[in-house]
Amino acid sequence: MKVLLRRDIKGVGRRGDVVEVKKGFARNYLIPSGSGLEATDTMETQAASMRRSRDLRDAQSRAAAETQKGVIESATIVISARAGNNGRLFGSVTEADVVNAIRTATNISLERSQIVMDEHIKVLGAAAVAAELFDGVVATVRFEVAAK
């Protein structure tokens, strides 16, 4: 069944796309939730206008993300944590700690899910993590973990 998506659905498509999905998925989820409409031949103009608005919004979001990337990468960020005499932290520095430090230092709000850490930081010193600001725009966040 062909469906015109009214919003982005992960693994299916983006807003304005006409996609082929199983009938049950369309009838039981997409159409009742308002996420999609059954596609007809006359919906091509509606789909095109949805794609144009999506592309314009994506261009604006990408430009804003590039600006945020420059601010984040140039900021001096310090995270204070309790540590023992040997330089190991009593806890660890998590994604939430990094988000709070970025918000404090730069006034930019990010979500925890945007921070990519291989593992939590458990020692004092300099560290770096990646922040996925937009699709394809990744900022490197450099910060110093200092003892309280």
Image (tube, rainbow, N blue to C red):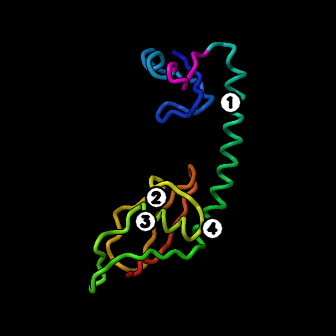
* Magenta-colored span: 31-39
Where disc 4 sits, the SS reads helix
Which quadrant would the C terminus be assigned to in this image? bottom left
Q: Which residue is mark 3?
A: 97
Q: Which residue is mark 1?
A: 50
Mark earlier in primary sequence (3, 2) = 3
Rendering quarter of residue 37: top right
Mark earlier in primary sequence (4, 1) = 1
For the residues labelled 1 and 2, the Cα–Cα distance comes to 30 Å
Q: Is residue 59 left or right of residue 84?
A: right
Q: Is residue 139 above or below residue 28?
A: below
Q: Name the mark on residue 71.
A: 4
Residue 116 x/y as whole percent = 43, 58
For the residues labelled 2 and 4, the Cα–Cα distance comes to 16 Å
Q: Is residue 31 above or below residue 17?
A: above
The disc labelled 3 sits on which kind of residue? Asp
Packing grade of label 3 (10 A; few <14, some 14-19, many >=20) is some
